[in-house]
Amino acid sequence: MEYSKESLDRQKKIADLQEAGVICYANNFRAKQDIAEVRNSCHPESSGSLKGKSTNNDSVSSTEWQWLRSAETLMEIGAEKKVRTAGRIMSSRGMWKLTFGKLRDHSGDIQICFMKDNVSFFTGREEVQSLVVGGEEKSAYKIAEKFCQVGDYIGVEGELFMTKHGELTIFVSSFQILSKAVRPLPEKFHGVQDQETIYRQRYLDLVMNEESYERFLFRSKYIRYTREFYLQQGFVEIETPILGNAASGAAAKPFITHHNDFNEDFYLRIAPETSLKKATVGRFERVFEIGRNFRNEGSDPSHMQEFSVVEHYAAWWNFEDNIRFTEGLFDYLFDKLELERKRQIKDKEGNMKTVDFTTPWQRIDYVAGVKEKSGIDISKYWPEDAKTLRADIQQAGYTWDGIEHQATATMIDYLYKKVLRPSIVGPAFVYNYPKTMQPLARQSDTDENIVEQFQVVLNGWEILKAYSELVDPKKQQENFDAQSGALAAGDEEATSGDNDFVLAMEYGMPPQSGWGMGFDRVISLLMGQENLRDVVLFPLMKDEKSEAGMGKSKETKVAVAVINKTACTEKWQELNTIGHLSAAFWARSWKELFEQDTVTTHDGHDIHLNIQHAIMVKETSDSTSLQELLQHAKHHNFEVSEFTREMLETTDDAVVAEKTKAKKHSDIEYLGVLVFGNKKEVEKATEGFSLYQ
C-alpha cells in the first residue's frame, strides 16, 4: 500500500512511542462513560437518563453548570477524576500552555483541554509525568500535543468546566492512547464527498458526516421496531437456508455457486418463501425472518443484487388480514420513530410528491387499472398465450428490451410497470392480480383467473408484497411445470420448480397468507435518498483491481465496436463515435455516468446513454445489422454501449431524451454500437462485420 508523507510521519511516531514502552493499541478501556452521559452529568441532579442518547449540542444552560468549578481554579489546583470517557480526536489546536481538542464517540462530541504541567499520561503499563520518546524526554503535555493526532482514539479522565465561550469541556487530568491512526482523516471542512469513496470506505463517511451516521442509526431502529412489532403479534423468528437446490420463491434470475464437497451446483436464495412455508407444516403457525436475498440481475440506484428483507407467513390468515397487518405495522413504526405521517417522496423520474401515510390506505384494482391505462385485459391471458399477449402489447404501442423472450407473467409485470405503477402516489394497496402472475399464490374463490395478492406502492415505488398462499400441492406442481416451460423458452426470471416444497405441501399445509418487504427501498424513501446504496452500510462494489485492469479474470473477454459507415458521413463522425462508445463503456462498467442511464423511444425501447479496455473496431454499411447485433447482445447479457444521431448532435442529455422519446426504435439511426462479453461469444456475434478501415 502507498502512504503519504503524513502517514509515514505517523508511523515513525508510533514506532518511537512503542520503543518507549507505550502500548499504542490498547486491549480495553473499562468504565468508559458515553460522551452524552458525560455531558448530562454536568447537572448535579442528573439521573443519567440520557446515557447513550446522541447529542452534539455544545451549549449548556447556566443553571446546569453553576456548580462546576471554574477554569481558573482547575488551572491552579488541577482537575479531579470525576468523568472518564474515550473517543476519536476530531480536531486539535494549541494555545500557549493549553491544547484543546474535540473528542467524538457514538453518542456525540465534547471538547477536551490539556494544560502544561497539569496532566499525566498512562502508557498502558504505568502513569507518568514524562517519558523519553525518540531519544528526547517528553512531558505528558508534550505527548498530548504532538503525539495525539486527529483520528487517534484516546481515553481521558478529568473534570468538567465551562469555557468563557460557553462550551462544556473536560479538563484532562490523565489520558491514554488507545489506538493510533496511521492515515489522516479527510479534511474536516469538506468531509467525504466523493461518492465512490463513500461507498467503498463507509467508515470515513460515518466519522465525517453526521447525517450519514444518523441515517444508519435510523435504519437500525427501523429494523428493531419491525422485529418488536412481529413479536408483539405472536410471530416466531426463524432462520432458513441461503443455499438451496432450487431457485424458487420469486420470479428472478438466481446466483449459482458450486458446492465442492457435494460436487453440485446450488442457488443463492431469491426469497426465503418456500422454507418459511415448510416451517408452517411443522407447527409454526406464525413465522418471520429478517435476512438477505440475492438476485443476479441488473443494478441501478433502485436495485441491488443483494438486499435485506423481512418476510412472514401466518396460518389462518388471508391477504385481507395482511392488509390490516401492514397498516398496523406502519402505524407502529411511525409512532416509535416519531415520523410525520405526511412525507415528501420522489418518484422514479425525480418528481417530489406528498405521500400521506395516515391509515387506512388507498386500494387499486391491478387488472382494472392496467386495462384503463392500456386497453388490455390482462386477466384473460394464460401461460400458453405469450405470443398473443406479446402481439397485443405491441399492437397497443408498447414494447421493451427482451419482450421477445418473455413469458406471459413477465410481460404482464412489465406492462403494469410501464402504464399503471408510475401514476400511483399512495400509499396504495394494489390488488386483484391475474393468476398467471404468481404461481405460489392462491386463486380467488370467486374468480379463478385472479389470485389474492397485493403490493404497496409509494409514488410509483413498490415496497412490499403479500398474498394468500396456494397450499394445494397438485395445483402447485402444475404451476411449477408451467414455469419450467417458460425457463426452457429463455425467460430467466421465471420461477423454477421445487420438489421438496411440493413434498412438504403433500403432508398438509395450513391455509395462510405470506408477506415480504425490502428494507433498503422503504428506508431510502423515508430518508429522502435516491440511491439504495445510501442506506446500505457497505454496498457491494466491483473490486478496485478489477476496475483498473478491466478484465484480469479467468474468463477471457473482448469489446468490439461496430461503426455504421453509412450513418457516419465524415471521418470525424466515425472517430467521435468510437471515442464516445469507448468512454461510455468504461464509465458504465463501474458507476453511472449520468443521472439518467437510458432514454426511451416512443414505442418503449430503452437506449443506453453515453471506460480502460482494448477495443476491436469493425464497420458496417447496413444499419439494420446494428439493430440485430443489439438484440443478440442483450439476449446474451453482453455489456452494451450505443451512440445515436441524437447523441452526436447535442451534448445535452435532456435534449437527447426528448428527441428519442418521439421516435420508434426502428427509426433510431445508430452511428455505432459496442458489445463486451465472453471472447468467443462476442467474436461469433460480430464475425459478419469487417475490420474498420
Image: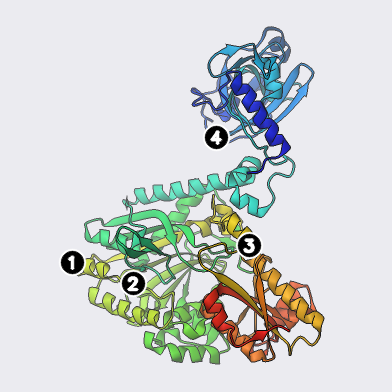
Label of residue 222 in the image: none
Amino acid type, label 4: Lys
Which percent across, then down, holds residue 689?
Answer: 63, 86
Classed neighbour count for the residue bearing mark 3: other residues with Cα under 10 Å, few (<14), some (14–19), many (≥20): some
Disc 4 + disc 1, Cβ < 8 Å: no
Q: Nearer the viewer, mark 3 or mark 4?
A: 3
Closest to the observer, 78 or 423: 78
- The answer to whether the residue labelled 2 contacts the one labelled 4, judged by CB atoms less than 8 Å apart, is no
Label 4 or label 1, whichever comes before in sequence order? 4
Q: Amino acid at mark 1?
A: Tyr
Q: Secondary structure at mark 3?
A: loop
In which quadrant will I find the N terminus? Answer: top right
Mark yes or no: residue 331 visible: yes
* Rendered image quadrant of residue 557: bottom right
Residue marked by disc 4: 53
Q: Give the image location of residue 64, x and y in percent.
A: 64, 22
| Residue named by callout 1 | 507
Tell me the amino acid under the disc marked 2: Leu
Q: Is 258 or 491 nearer to us in this picture?
A: 258
Q: Residue furthest top?
A: 77
